[in-house]
Amino acid sequence: RTGESWAFLQTEINRQAQSLIPVLSSGNNNLTMFAPTEEAMIDASFWLLSQPSAMLTAVFTYHIASGAMNTTYLATQYIIQSLYAPASMGNQPQRLPVFYTMRKCSEVGWIYIGITVSFTTANVYINTSQIVIPDTVASNGIVQGVNQVLAPPSVTVMDTLIAQTPATFNTLINALNSMNLSATLRQNGGWTLFAPTDSAFAAFQSSQPAIYQAVVTDPGTFTKVRNTRAIK
């Protein structure tokens, strides 16, 4: 649409996903950005404004794909790979076979990492969103304006813990993994997790070394503590 500014999207990237600015600005990259329109951003604003930086960085990264793809090209595809890759997969984007949109990750559970493409004679859809402002050419790629914010289904509580930059929850993550509890926080349970940081665990270890050792090594003790901190 003439005059579309994507101001809301730009504001949120500048505010909460600054690590993407060099990626989107570099003339050495050749990208497609599935950019939510102002209306789409406003529709999702309550959710967007309540999310931490790590979550929004993951979400906006999911809107970016390598290669300049116009709608003519997109209409020949079934699935494309975004730049988003969960930290649990080593932050490495995975190329998917056409018929699969899910891949087993290195931990228990499944990670969705593809963007599906569908089309009619008149429209192209990215997941469930419609491209409403097609083929805006930039110096380093193409912008496809979409009418919904795309949300990678794999951005779970566990992914959010792992994605923190700088790393903040290593002790908690290691404890969850060693006790096979990370799968619980990848489930669609509507979790709220009160997550101790590494510095909180360090202070706890210093003041209560025996209890600390039980919490981080004994599944029964850790589960009791976790159940007081993870609520639905």
Image (cartoon, rainbow, N blue to C red):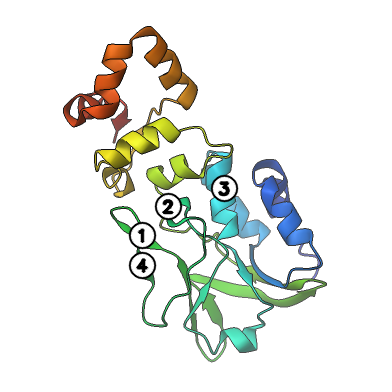
Instruction: Count residues near mark 2 (Cα–Cα under 10 Å), then give few for <14, some for 14-19, many for 20+.
Output: some
Q: Are marks 3 and 2 in contact (CB under 8 Å)?
A: no
- Number of callouts in the render? 4
Q: Which of marks 1 and 2 is nearer the N terminus?
A: 2
Residue 20 image point, x, y percent: 68, 53
For marks 4 and 2, the one nearer the N-term is 2
Residue of label 4: 103
- Position of residue 182 relative to residue 149, above or below, is above
Mark 2: which amino acid?
A: Ser
Tell me if 101 is positioned left or right of 5 in this view.
left
What crowding class fits label 4: few (fewer than 14 Cα within 10 Å), some (14-19), or many (20 or more)?
some
Whether tag 1 and tag 2 are in contact, CB under 8 A, the answer is yes
The residue under label 3 is: 56
Count residues near mark 1 (Cα–Cα under 10 Å), then give few for <14, some for 14-19, many for 20+. Answer: some
Residue at x-position 25% and y-position 28%: 217
Whether residue 142 can be seen here? yes
Location of residue 62 (image quadrant): bottom right
Locate residue 134: give its quadrant: bottom right
Q: Name which residue lies at 31% across and 37% down.
A: 176
Q: Distance between the residues labelled 3 and 4?
A: 22 Å
Mark 1 falls on what kind of element?
loop
Circle 1 residue: 105
Between residue 135 and residue 83, name the one nearer to us: 83
At mark 4, the secondary structure is strand
